[in-house]
Amino acid sequence: RRSHKTFASRRVIFSGNTADRHNSLLRYKGTTTMVKQTDLDGAQAKVDELILDKNCGPILVRLAWHDSGTYDDSLKGQEWPGAGGAIGSIRFEPEILHGANAGLSGALKLLEPIHEAFPEVSYADLFQMASSRAIALAGGPKIDMKYGRVDATNAEQCSPEGNLPDGEAAEESGKYGGTSGTASTEDTTPEGHLRKVFYRMGLTDEDIVALSGAHTFGRAYKDRSGAGKESTKFTDGKAKVMRPDGTEAKYTPGGSAWTEQWLTFDNSYFHVTPDESADPELLKLSTDKVIFVDEGFKPFAEKFRDSQEAFFESYAKAHKKLSELGSKFEPIE
C-alpha cells in the first residue's frame, strides 16, 4: 500500500533488538501531576533548541498528528479516553507499532530527554507543543495552543489501528482506507476517504484542505509511509535547503518532498500541487491532487494558493482543533 506521508498506513518492519526496543518504550509512563507554567516554558525552550539543532520539525508534526488523529467524535460520550485523540497514547505498544507510525519511535526518543527534564509536562502536551513550535519556527503561523493535557496511562487506552488516512489506494484492492478502525474509512476515491477520516474527527472540508497544506513542510520516506523515492534532487544532501532565518539547514539525505524548500512553512504546496509543469521529482499523492478537483475542496485550495495569509489563518485554526481532539485538560498552576 502506498500511503499518505502524514497519516500513512502500511506494515511496519523494525530493525534492532526487539527486547531493547520494547523495554525502552516502557519508560514512557506519563504524567499525573499538575503542570506549572514555568515547566511549560522550560520545555518549550528545549523543544525550540532541539528543532533548530536537528531540523527535525516535520517528524515532530507527524508524531503529534498521529497521536491526535485517532479521534472518533462519535465516541466522545464514552468514559475518557475512549474516543482517542491527543492523549499521548502513541508512546505505547501496540499503537507505536501500527503501520501508520513507522519511524515515529525515533521522534519519541528525540523528545524523551525533554520529558525527563520536565516530567510534570505530559507527553500529550509535549507532543502537541513540539508540533506547534515546529510550524512556528519554520515560518508558519503561531498557533493558540492550550496546555494541561492528561496522559493516557496504559496500552489498553490505545485506539485500534486503521483510523488514519492513506495517500494512495492499496494496489491489491484499489481502495483507500479500511474497516479495522473505530469506523470504516474505506472508499474507492481519495476525496471520499479523506472525508470519512476527517469527518469522523469532527473536522470540515476547510480543515482538510488547510491541514493538507502542511505537506509544504517535510518529506515522505518509502520505508516509513510507502510513498516517494529513496531520494530526489531536492533531498539528496547536495540540494541547498534553507531555513526561514536565511541559514542553510543540515539534513540527512533521503525521501521525497512536496516542495523545493521543504523546511519552510508557507503556501508553496498550493502552487506546486495544481501545476502540471512542476518538477516531476516533487511528490504529488492522489489525496494531494484531489483538493484542486473536488468541488468541496477546490475553493479552499484556490483561496490558499492565492493568499498565504488566508492559508495561515485557516491552518492555525485547524491545527488547534486537531491538537485538542479527545484531550482532557487540567488547570495550569
Image: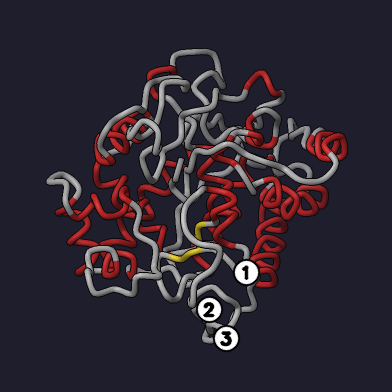
Residue that protrudes farthest toward the top in the picture: 78
- Tag 3 secondary structure: loop
Judge the density around disc 2: few (<14), some (14-19), many (≥20) Cα neighbours within 10 Å: many
Q: Position of residue 240 (x, y in %)?
A: 53, 84
Q: Are marks 2 and 3 in contact (CB under 8 Å)?
A: yes
Judge the density around disc 3: few (<14), some (14-19), many (≥20) Cα neighbours within 10 Å: few
- Tag 1 secondary structure: loop
- Tag 2 secondary structure: loop
- Name the amino acid, label 2: Arg
- Name the amino acid, label 3: Thr
* Residue at mark 1: 55
Q: Position of residue 294 (x, y in %)?
A: 16, 46
Image quarter hosting the C terminus: top right
- The dot on residue 243 is 2
**Looking at this view, is 164 or 54 the one in front?**
164
- Which residue occupies 23% across, 66% down? 305
Separation of marks 2 and 3 at Cα, in angstroms? 6 Å
Q: Are marks 1 and 2 in contact (CB under 8 Å)?
A: yes
**Which numbered disc flags the more N-terminal residue, 1 or 2?**
1
* Residue at mark 3: 247
Q: Are marks 1 and 3 in contact (CB under 8 Å)?
A: no
